[in-house]
Image (tube, rainbow, N blue to C red):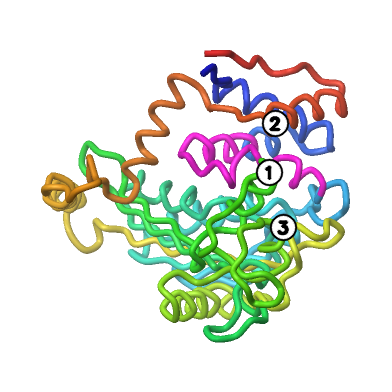
Amino acid sequence: MSKFVIKAEKCRIFIEQVLTELGASSAMASKWGQLIVETSLLGFDSHGIRMLERYIAHIEGGGIDLSAEPEIVKQHNGCVHIDAKGGLGHLAAYKATSLALEKAKEFGISCVAVQNCNHIGACGLYVRKAALNDCIGICTTVSRASMASWGGKTALLGSNPIAISAPIEDMPPFLFDAASTIVSMGKITAAKDNNENIPDNWALDEQGRPTTNPAEAITGTLLPFGGHKGFGLAMAVEILSAFLAGGAPSANVKSWIGQTKEPIDASVTVIVVNISKFRDAAVFKKDMKNWVELLTNSEPRKGFERIYYPGQIEGEYYENRMKSGIVLDKHIREMFDRLVDKFKIEKPPIEKV
């Protein structure tokens, strides 16, 4: 079966053109395009270029302010508090990560909390940057309420993801990125876009019944992973993100899907640990390599051909997609066509392979 792909740099240029048409500066558009494309390169497809029209809708509706610049409102040693001012969430999270790396270099450990933020894509995008700089990275964020309290049926907590990354010698970084729910809302919306059903253990409808309909899942509730454990993790992420940053709890975060006129008022926290302040980073990375090889070279059980560590698949996706291009499904190809017509820009070169 034929596949359609686009090379990463061509995709970034296309996204830069779109954002420039919307009024962004060239530098802003270029960096944002890079972050969106990198998300897809890593295989976080539900949070990457497929979300482009959703971001555009928020920019045009007023929910994302392209003139907003993240502002440091308070800092002390390695602790920093940022107001994102309702601008592009990716750029606020990227600034938080860059600042956290800078502070960790000086103080060993840093924590940057961001309030008044919009959708940041995949948390793993930011912690990977820490790992590539020989640090351990942790990123958490809150989203609109989509999970009920354990045993309840009213959505009061977000899917509230957490990502952790660390470097490994001569191998892709360890990269764990997971929602507190069984699945992220991004995968639910992707299923809806593609007219696909979802497994019946992902979500409940508004009446609290299991559903395979992604539209019912969006208006219903997502189930926490691990039962009460996922519920507890979602609460912990909310403490670390919303309450530390002084932002809204997820019960008060505005919808990313149902409205476009207001910033969603999410909060993000980025923590960076400078390994070299504790021990030799090269030895740490060697120890990491020995450890993950111990785990992944163990004998797989029946039904499994190979054992992966978190981040290994993403690393392979990145390498393969940088060489061969990002695979585009029908929904994304049609989205590109709509954007070409809307903004009167040149269609990006899409290859059939």
Going by the numbered disc 1, the residue's amino acid type is Asn
Q: Earlier in the sequence, mark 2 or mark 1?
A: 2
Q: Is residue 37 left or right of residue 320?
A: right
Q: Quadrant of residue 247?
A: bottom right
Label 3, residues with CA under 10 Å away: few <14, some 14-19, many ≥20: some
Q: Of helix, strand and loop, which one carries label 1? A: loop
Residue 15: assigned label: 2
Using the image, determine if residue 266 lies above or below residue 17. below
Q: Earlier in the sequence, mark 3 or mark 2?
A: 2
Residue 187 covered by magenta stretch: no
* Residue 331 on image: x %, y %: 69, 33
**Depth-wise, is mark 3 or mark 2 nearer the camera?**
3
Q: Earlier in the sequence, mark 1 or mark 3?
A: 1
| Label 1 close to label 3 by CB (< 8 Å) | no
Q: Which residue is mark 3?
A: 215
Going by the numbered disc 3, the residue's amino acid type is Ala
